[in-house]
Image: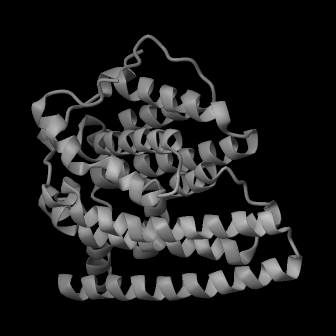
Amino acid sequence: MRLVEGKASAARFRGESYARLVARLYPEASFLDLALAADLNSWFHVYDDQFELAEVGRDPDLARRWADKADALLRGAPLDRSAGPVLRGLADIRDRFQIYASEAWWNRFTDHFRDCFETAVWEVENRVHGRIPDPDAYVQHKLNIAYVPPSFDVVEFVEHFELPEVIRESSAYRRLIHEAGHVVVCTNDLIGLRRELSQGEFHNLVIVLRYDAGCSLQEAVERVIDTIARRIEDFQAAKKELMALLDTLGLRHNTREGTMRCVVGLEHWMRGYHDWALESQRFSDPVLREQVESFHHELVD
């Protein structure tokens, strides 16, 4: 797809190792599902770099056009003549998912993707105007910019199992999704702190807390560590609540088994992301803005 070109970009991409990431996130997936997940996560991070480190990250109008074009593409719009590697890569991922995805799953996935695009625009606007968000608003938005909701959707996709609505909409399962997502966000921001400080980036929970509370950087770090511990405790409590709900509903064995495999998938995500973040060069070798190729030419009509 030519998303990564040149020796320096290729070396950085190999060091960030998205194949190892998805192997940790979806360890029981089939090879074909794992390959698709790897391409999706590779695309996520190239796209994310466009909003953080390339031309789009300093131009709200370009960011808005990116978001709208990407969303339209997921919802079936054809590629236009200006489409380059990023949009063609997204179209390829779209077409491969739609071979197997149900309509209901695809609609949830694209809605979650749209939230990610909108949050990327929100970050660009904050950055341009020097607007540091409050901690609560930041965490809610960070779930999207970290591409957590659509990635959690992939758990059901690789399991070849869709949760019944009575489970998906239950307070217990909603809590599981909520707490797992927050653990991933906190982990990302702790391990990525050094990188974002070097880039002058303030979209990081540690930095946001320090600014909001007027505390030291170390105190903010400790608060995020404590948050992770509490979130994991809440996740475990929600898991017990869900198991009790399954007993109450008297669902078939296959449905119970599929549901619990999705719960285990969230546990894989929390631990797998942590382990990958520690070993990936994405956080240990900070990249500056001028070192990322910009694909904003794709927005030319």
Residue 209: quarter of image: bottom left
Colour convention: one colour
Relative to 201, is 91 on the left or the right? right
Compared to residue 215, the image places residue 301 above or below, namely above
Q: Is residue 78 left or right of residue 218?
A: right
Q: Position of residue 127 (x, y in %)?
A: 29, 53
Q: Is residue 131 visible?
A: yes
Q: Residue at x 19, y 85 (%)?
A: 218
Can you give x and y, in whole percent of width and height, for residue 148 in the image?
A: 49, 58
Q: How many marks?
A: 0
Q: Nearer the viewer, residue 118 or 146?
A: 146
Which residue is painted at 59% across and 22% down in the image?
Answer: 77
Question: Where residue 125 appears, x then y in whole percent?
Answer: 36, 49
Q: Quadrant of the N terminus?
A: top left
- From this view, report whether residue 288 is shown above or below residue 61: below
Residue 165 at x, y = what percent? 80, 61
